[in-house]
Amino acid sequence: MTVQDPVTGRTRFAVVPASYVFLLRETDPGSGTGTEVLLQLRQNTGYMDGFWAAAAAGHVERGETAEAAARREALEEIAVADLELRFATAMQRTAHDLPIDERVDFFFTARSWSGEPRIVEPAKCADLRWFRLDALPEPVVPHEAVVLAGLRRGDLPALSHHGF
């Protein structure tokens, strides 16, 4: 999708920003058995239904920072607050199957929060489960799988790309 710049009159493409939160926890701390991530199974959203995805994610609203959007989405989707967010990566993404195909995604992790994660929007979320980073379910939303693989390996760059 393109928009016309009101100042220059030039045509530019529109970018949709979104924030994602991966809640992480250690399984049996001290045992070396690994890290788990909380994922939701999408349903009735019109995008990647039937795929596992970040437990909380959504568009950044006008006048909202990426961090504020991440906190809002976590409260709205899984009822957790007071997240200690850590920036993981920003992903420039193109998705040729969407009406607005240019995306900038901000990924955060959190290992500390208040509240017990639960499904708040059952019409959009069929399941909510913890999975080891080295034993993820199938299928995972493809661009999110890239981030999860980088988290598992410990080599996730600050800026990543998908779909180019």
Image (cartoon, rainbow, N blue to C red):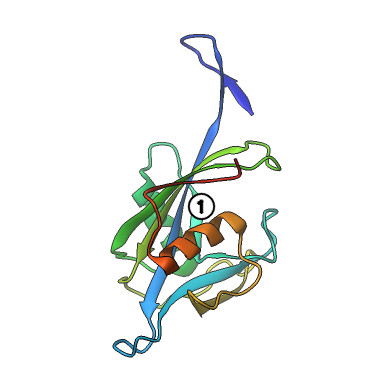
Q: Is residue 62 above or below residue 41?
A: above
Q: Position of residue 22 (x, y in %)?
A: 43, 65
| Closest to the observer, 62 or 132 | 132
10 Å crowding of disc 1: few (<14), some (14-19), many (20+): some
Q: Residue at x 46, y 10 (%)?
A: 7
Q: Is residue 125 above or below residue 71?
A: below
Q: Residue at x 46, y 56 (%)?
A: 20
Classify residue 49 by image quadrant. bottom right
Quadrant holding the N terminus: top right
Q: Is residue 78 left or right of residue 136?
A: left
| Closest to the observer, 137 or 69 | 137
Name the residue that disc number 1 marks.
58
Q: Is residue 130 left or right of residue 11?
A: left
- Could you tell me how many numbered marks the image carries? 1
Mark 1 falls on what kind of element? strand
Q: Amino acid at mark 1?
A: Gly
Q: Position of residue 144 (x, y in %)?
A: 54, 58
Quadrant holding the C terminus: top right
Q: Position of residue 115 (x, y in %)?
A: 36, 75
Q: Is residue 105 above or below residue 99?
A: below
